[in-house]
Amino acid sequence: MKLLILNGPNLNLLGQREPDIYGHSTYADLCGMIADYAKERGHQARFVQSNHEGALIDAIQLADADGTDGIVINPGAYAHYSYAIHDALRSIRVPAVEVHISDISAREPWRHTSVTAPACVTVIAGQGFPATCGPSTRWKPWNDKMCKGDSMYRLCVIGDPVSHSRSPAIHTALLRQRRLEGIYTTVTVREGELEAFVAEARQGAWDGFNVTMPHKQAILPLLDAVEGDAAAMGAVNTVVVRQGRAVGYNTDGEGFVRSLPFTASGKRVLVLGSGGAASAVSRALRRSGAALTICCRHPEKTAGWNMETRLWRELPLLAADCDLLVNATPLGMTGQEEFADFRFLENCHGWVYDLVYQPRETALLAAAQDRGLPVIGGLALLHAQAELAFELFVGE
């Protein structure tokens, strides 16, 4: 994840400016602490400090164009009157979190209102730094009401590696759309650390989290309950934590059906693959009333699915007789093997849906479009399953 750490006026004077309020640590100490924290978790942190409003606005606008995933901004005194910074934050797609080293609600009355905060996902205020309300463990970002209001959601995605995940951007946008306070981040949890992470979550470190490789199966025995598709498939991608109980779900299948621009009932669907993605999609399609056929290289892997399974060599014949073809294999993914050819599309007349989203336009989608076929890319599923997970997190 690429982060912009933006500090406003007088933050360069940390260490000498009112140390009884801001502490004795310097701005260099602050940057070093954040840089180390980010590096440990595989993130990139870029630092900008300026005493000039226009320079801060320029940095915000640049973040929208240079691939920045999130902004952490301490506007300083600009928080209380800079509608220009507010407008800049509102004008970009990059989510921002506003932070203050001091507890502005306990200081002079003119500091109690932030005009920039409504343009941010949430506001975190502490008491100097190193923060007295900082992490008590590796995975617990806030454990004190000074840092977390009762209504603030603490969400993340875990895995190894996980820094490449698009989930923080999606969920942060969902929080903003619903005007909910909260934060969503990535947490690297290595093999052997999963049990400790789940224990921390039960103790209140997290309200929910998404799960990616390599933990989707390993987390099952650590949960208090596993619901629906997650239980049937033996794979979890979403965990909701309430009142000390951790419950697992899998939103991939229902997310896929939700992402379709048409009703699946009665449609002839050909699903390519025999892995977890194919299983999730196929189960949801069957529930939706689709006429389903699986095509794969290893039919023995689908033995327990109770679905019609055909061999890979039959793909050209099967593709010519479907309303929707779904690629649920890794073929075409960045760094993975590609389809040998796309001749199976020559007699295809239906939609082509590629679950792969890296690259955004796969060779399969390009070949289908060249033949005039309607296509759907993997980002549609990514967003739809994330929305379902978010609804579970916030109780919608």
Image (cartoon, helix red, strand yellow):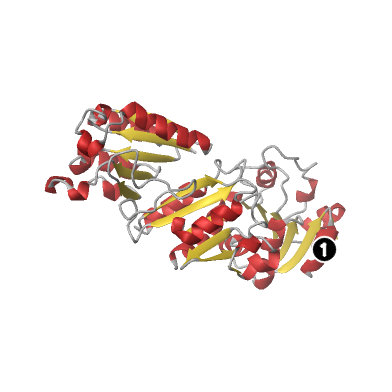
- Residue 371: x and y, percent? 69, 46
Helix, strand or loop at mark 1: strand
- Residue 181: x and y, percent? 35, 56
Q: Looking at this view, is 158 or 68 the one in front?
A: 158
Q: Residues within 10 Å of mark 1 (few under 14, many from 20)?
A: many
39 w.r.t. 260: above or below = above
Q: Looking at this view, is 36 or 52 the one in front?
A: 36
Question: Is 45 left, or right, of 10 in this rendering?
Answer: right
Where is residue 351, by image quadrant?
bottom right
Q: Looking at this view, is 110 or 268 the one in front?
A: 110
120 w.r.t. 262: above or below = above
What is the number of callouts on the image? Answer: 1
> From the image, which quarter does the C terminus lie in?
bottom left
- Residue sitting at 82 percent across and 63 percent down? 309
Amino acid, disc 1: Thr
336 w.r.t. 155: above or below = above
Q: Residue furthest left?
A: 109
- Residue sitting at 50 percent across and 58 percent down? 201
43 w.r.t. 265: above or below = above
- Residue sitting at 61 percent across and 44 percent down? 160
- Residue 60: x and y, percent? 34, 35
Where is residue 231, by image quadrant?
bottom right
Question: Is 40 left, or right, of 213 in this rendering?
Answer: left
The answer to whether residue 377 is visible is no
- Residue 205: x and y, percent? 45, 55
Q: Looking at this view, is 370 or 4 the one in front?
A: 4
Q: Which residue is mark 1?
A: 309
- Residue sitting at 73 percent across and 45 percent down? 331
The answer to whether residue 178 is visible is yes
Question: Is 39 left, or right, of 106 in this rendering?
Answer: right
